[in-house]
Image (tube, rainbow, N blue to C red):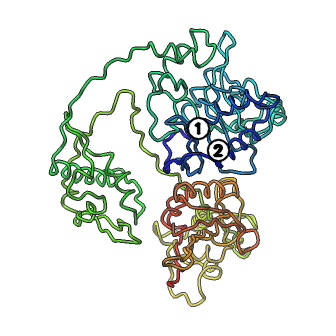
Amino acid sequence: MFKKKATYKPASSINGKLRKQFVAHLTTAYPHCFHGLEEETMKQKVATLVPPTLESCLALTAKGEKVTLYTQGKLPRYVQLEEPGKGLSLVPTLYTLQLAPDLLPCVVVPFQVTAFLQSGADLMMRGIQVFPQVEAGLPVAVGFRKEEGDLVLVGIGITALSKAAFDESMATSAAGKGVLMIACIGDTLHPNMTLPGPAAPLPGHAPPILQQAIQVAAQEEPLENWQEVTTELETVELAEPTQVSLQIPTTAEAEHAFEQALLYGLYQIREEAIPLALPMPSSTLMERHILPFLATEEGYETPGIKQTSWKKTSKFLAKQKTLLKCKEQQGQTIVTDVTWDAPALREFVPHPLANQEDDEPAPVKKAKPKVLDLQDLYTLPAKLAPILDFEQARLMTEQQINTLLMRYYERESLIISKHNVRVDPMLADLLLPSDYPHETVSTRVLLKRCLGMATHSYRIGDTGRVRKGVPPKVLINVCGRAGKGGRVTTVVTQLEAYFQEDALEEIAERLRVQCAASTIVRPGLKAGSMEVMVQGPWADQVRAVLEERGMAPVWITVEKTTKKK
């Protein structure tokens, strides 16, 4: 959830009534930690778990999930999931678990699995050694045991299934997710997190050099608790960073770099035939096709758009009239067309890009999406059986029907040239109009007449269901009332011919993240039909997502029925 940095709103203090409510929530959520404690001990534990300096802020993760983060200074203490009804929603972080390890039960995994968790993956059932006695939807800690038996916590998450379901799944060798991870060692939970000092000894949120030291300590030294690790880390001497003085490019140099990067991006699109979904927001063009091609000279900083006279992406693109056509739409600059035969683009010579860091993986070219296999199938009428030897009610492709026709031409010696045949009485009676005046006919005309007489069907994929009729086009309809206060939605219909229901859920989830808007899959107006609805005018984004899933552009139709107020 926090593998990529989230977006945070300003923090506010938890004082007075809010603090009392938080304490009540905590003691209700985790009663086993406070049961049977004396009053003085209870006060001390509450003061430790809910410090007076506790603050809260709203956070929006990279996947669009809304959570509340409770922090102490720059240290995350609790994450509250905004999904009521799915068990306990207040989850302590690794820092809080260091102070009260009995708050959460622990899922034990092999040490090798922690690398996958740090890369942002959820915990799969087959990677679990010990699953605690918990129900689905409850928070748990995740950790591994050293050879000495000490437990090292590395993350927190929410169980995807109960203990009983886990045991049943493992008995049948079923695969699937066991824990949905919230945070792991190395994630950034706080917007301004810095190196923790002695009073903040949580290894799970330390910089990489401290994480490495923790891993070494976890493998080689006995680990009694987190405090012991912190004491050892205080003695680690950090190498002094090399001071490198980089020159700031001038305005002219920065502008030249951006102009060359735009040419490079368009050059790559043209040369590699990369699909370009136009119209496109200016921010998308900048992120995908300009910034990756900024050239940086040795000894200079990478230029930013603020270092140019344009200051904004929209103004920069609006100045490129020989290359781009732009328009303003709802306060946003939209790129509508590219002049591919512009002299500057024809004469462009690619420049060398800045060398990547040694530890950075080489860029991988994004593969073009594989288009769904749509087969047109035909059933020939019985009256054509005398000239075409086929089984009645058999489904055939256009190529197979053409092969049957060619066999008839050869058998009756009707071929004159590659594309023409003589007309015999059978062809004249069955395939040609009664007033056809010529003695020869094109093979293409005869094939077209054959297909016109056949019953049309289609099938999507090798294992797809055969449906009668012509393949329907997916309709993207932007409807509602435009203007201030008007509600506009984008409804996608006729998807059931191309996708199963589970695929529709995946499309809706992708659109929810892509558009940062509410989505829903619901039954359509026709019986057995399904549709996807997105809040807002998102026709271009929906088209792009469908093309990612293998839809050809010719199978998609866009309509706009918004009314002005």
Q: Position of residue 41 (x, y in %)?
A: 73, 27
Which three-letter amino acid code belongs to the residue tagged 1?
Answer: Pro
Q: Position of residue 329 (x, y in %)?
A: 39, 72
Residue 383 lies left or right of residue 296; in this view the side is: right
Residue 386, labelled with which disc?
Answer: none
Q: Position of residue 1 (x, y in %)?
A: 58, 42
Residue 52, labelled with which disc?
Answer: 1
Residue drawn where x is 55% and y is 67% of the image: 555
- Under tag 1, what secondary structure? loop
Residue 146 lies left or right of residue 445; in this view the side is: right
Q: Are marks 1 and 2 in contact (CB under 8 Å)?
A: yes
Front residue of 98/424: it is 98
In this figure, which residue is indicated by the disc labeled 2?
A: 19
Residue drawn where x is 65% and y is 65% of the image: 458
Relative to 51, does residue 62 appear above or below in the rendering?
below
Q: Label 2: few (<14), some or many (≥20) within 10 Å? A: some
How many dots with numbers?
A: 2
N-term-proximal mark, 1 vs 2: 2
Which three-letter amino acid code belongs to the residue tagged 2?
Answer: Arg
Q: Position of residue 133 (x, y in %)?
A: 81, 31
Q: Residue furthest bottom?
A: 435
Front residue of 522/25: it is 25
Q: Label 1: few (<14), some or many (≥20) within 10 Å? A: some
When asked about the image quadrant of residue 166, the answer is top right
When asked about the image quadrant of residue 494, the answer is bottom right
Front residue of 525/78: it is 78
Relative to 422, does residue 228 appear above or below in the rendering?
above
- Under tag 2, what secondary structure? helix
Front residue of 242/161: it is 242
Q: CA distance from mark 1 to mark 2?
A: 8 Å
